[in-house]
Image (tube, rainbow, N blue to C red):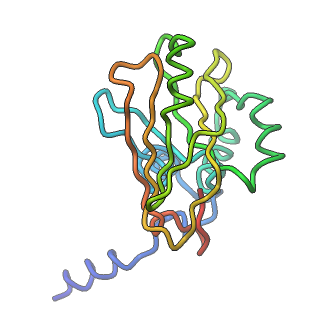
Amino acid sequence: MPHALVALLFFLAQPFWESKVPEQWTDQEIDILCHASPWAQTTNRDPEVLVYLATAAPIEEAEGELRLRSKRPLAEPDPDYNDFLRLNREKVLVLAIPWTQARFGTDAEQKQMEEESLMIVGRKKYQLVGHFPPSRNDPVLRLVFPREVKEADKAVLFQLYLPGMPFPERDVEFRTKDLLYHGKLEM
């Protein structure tokens, strides 16, 4: 009987991002948040690709903690991206993909990414509205979509075309009920 009670209490416990402030997160917890949390997942195809919601508060707070704790400076996002986000944060959400490929693809492949990458919410499809390509100083592909997801939506599916990658078509789905942070939908 005591084991069942312990298991029940563990099941009912809040995740660390709800029960602790970011300054109290351990390095391991930050790693979990950035790589295997409701806001960060891997795609459905091999080779797996990490995809995360860069504009979600817990991801931004985890990245901020990493910058504070790091003994070597972490790469800052592209200044143009930071300016864009400062001006458009309420209108867009950004999906980020750390770029490990040697190249970002041809111009034709990049155009295909712009035309084929979609965000699907319910039965509505939303086209990619922009992107920030990876660079040597900022090796992250950032895909910009309209902020059209509501808490009442069940899930958001991203169908992506990633130029320069073997098997460039990738899907990743986020369940909105799992994306609540301090009672608010964070994307």
5 versus 106 height, above or below:
below
Locate residue 152, reporting x and y percent.
51, 73
Residue 53 as seen in the image, left or right of residue 71: left
Quadrant where the N terminus sits is bottom left
Q: Residue at x 31, y 40 (%)?
A: 44
Viewer-proximal residue among 2 and 61:
61
Observer-nearest residue: 34 or 47? 47
Residue 164 located left or right of residue 8? right
Report the residue that reaches farthest toward the left: 1
Q: Outermost residue, bottom direction?
A: 1
Q: Give the side of residue 174 with respect to residue 142, left or right.
A: left
On-image quarter of the C terminus: bottom right
Q: Give the vertical position of 109 relative to 20 (above or below).
A: above
Numbered-mark total: 0
In depth, the one of 29 and 153 nearer the eye is: 153
Q: Position of residue 149 (x, y in %)?
A: 57, 61
Tell me which corner region of the image, top left, top right, bottom left or bottom right, holds residue 151. Answer: bottom right
Q: Residue at x 20, y 86 (%)?
A: 2
Image position, residue 81 (x, y; %): 75, 34
Q: Position of residue 23 (x, y in %)?
A: 65, 57
- Who is closer to the viewer here, 25 or 32? 32
Q: Residue at x 79, y 30 (%)?
A: 80
The quadrant where residue 74 appears = top right
64 relative position to 175: left or right? right
5 over 132 or under it: above or below: below
Q: In the image, what residue occupies the spot 41% across and 19% down? A: 165
